Image (cartoon, rainbow, N blue to C red):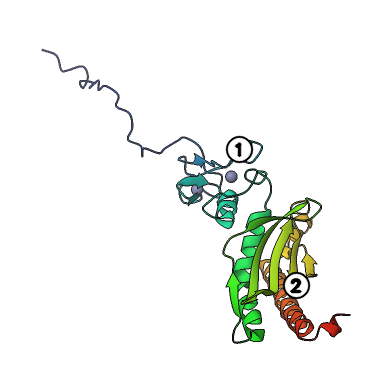
């Protein structure tokens, strides 16, 4: 009758630890996030190339039931539910559509106001909500979102925010037939700077970029209106 030599050891069958059904073991790639339930971005471009990004539910974007990284979520939203692009989705590293959408969303009220300000009673503004792929006569292409002042017979003034496929960093604006603005936005240009700008500097540069855009677009709209009213002035 000695003392029990040891506490009995319970040998339990190892049960799998309970994990959410979507736990993937993939580390989320968002800075500072330590979740291991990331899901890979499902974007596939026109050449069949996929995206290597994987993010957790907090840091990814769902568009039409598809799971995307932020960039490609932006691309899918910009292009609209149809994923409608002729010839397939933009190259995996092309940020044109989401850049156009981002700038266009910020400018939306200003462009609508500029067109409203010169509209005649029988004219109205028609604004696109999504980015379209457009082609130039030489077959080069661009991502574009447009606003049109129309009357009963057609377009009176068109304002388009666009990014050419061959120059994916340059935001351009056309009013009527004139390109009135072409610039690399400061938040993209600053990536090339060795010295990072302060948050205040970045914000100031961003505000100045949009201020210039608004002024330039409003002037362009006025000019086209006057030209339409007085065609001789166009010379
Ligand atoms: Zn995360
Ligand atoms: Zn992606």
Q: Where is residue 128 in the image (x, y as percent from the top left)?
A: 59, 66
Q: Where is residue 106 in the image (x, y as percent from the top left)?
A: 61, 70
Q: In which quarter of the image is the C terminus?
A: bottom right
Residue at the image point whose x is 59% and y is 84% from the top = 122
Q: Position of residue 203 (x, y in %)?
A: 67, 70
The mark that comes first in sequence, 2 or 1, is 1
Furthest-front residue in view? Answer: 153
Residue that numbered label 2 is attached to: 176
Q: Where is residue 215 in the image (x, y as percent from the top left)?
A: 73, 80
Label 2 CB sits under 8 Å from any ligand 2 atom: no
Neighbour tally class for label 1: few under 14, some 14-19, many 20 plus, Cα within 10 Å: some
Q: In which quarter of the image is the N terminus?
A: top left
Residue 193 drawn above or below residue 110: above
As drawn, is 135 to the left or to the right of 49? right
| Mark 2 to mark 1 CA distance (whole Å) | 38 Å
Label 1 CB sits under 8 Å from any ligand 2 atom: no
Q: What element carries label 1?
A: loop
For residue 45, say whether it is visible: yes
Residue 29 drawn above or below residue 143: above
Pick the residue in front: 153 or 116.
Answer: 153
Residue at the image point whose x is 58% and y is 60% from the top = 130
Residue at the image point whose x is 47% and y is 50% from the top = 64
Residue 94 drawn above or below residue 1: below
> Decide: marks 2, 1 in contact (CB < 8 A)?
no
Pick the residue in front: 147 or 99.
Answer: 147
Residue at the image point whose x is 79% and y is 66% from the top = 182
Quadrant hosting residue 51: top right
Q: Quadrant holding ligand 2?
A: top right
Residue that numbered label 1 is attached to: 50
For residue 31, say whether it is visible: no
- Can you tell which mark lies on residue 175? none
């Amino acid at each position: 009758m000695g003392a029990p030599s040891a506490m009995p050891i319970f040998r339990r069958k190892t049960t799998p630890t309970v994990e959410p059904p979507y736990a993937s073991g993939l580390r989320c790639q968002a800075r500072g996030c330590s979740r291991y339930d990331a899901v890979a971005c499902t974007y596939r471009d026109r050449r069949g190339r996929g995206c290597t990004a994987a993010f957790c539910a907090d840091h990814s974007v769902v568009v039409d039931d598809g799971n995307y990284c932020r960039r490609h979520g932006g691309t899918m939203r910009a292009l609209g539910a149809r994923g409608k692009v002729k010839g397939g989705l933009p190259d995996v590293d092309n940020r044109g559509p989401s850049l156009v959408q981002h700038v266009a969303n910020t400018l939306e009220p200003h462009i609508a106001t500029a067109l409203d300000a010169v509209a005649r009673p029988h004219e109205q503004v028609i604004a696109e909500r999504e980015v379209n792929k457009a082609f130039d006569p030489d077959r080069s292409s661009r991502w574009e979102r447009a606003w049109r002042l129309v009357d009963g017979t057609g377009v009176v003034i068109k304002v388009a925010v666009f990014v050419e496929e061959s120059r994916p960093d340059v935001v351009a604006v056309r009013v009527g037939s004139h390109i009135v603005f072409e610039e690399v936005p400061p938040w993209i240009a600053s990536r090339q700077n060795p010295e990072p700008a302060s948050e205040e500097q970045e914000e100031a540069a961003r505000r100045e970029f949009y201020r210039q855009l608004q002024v330039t677009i409003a002037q362009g709209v006025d000019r086209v209106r006057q030209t339409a009213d007085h065609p001789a002035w166009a010379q």
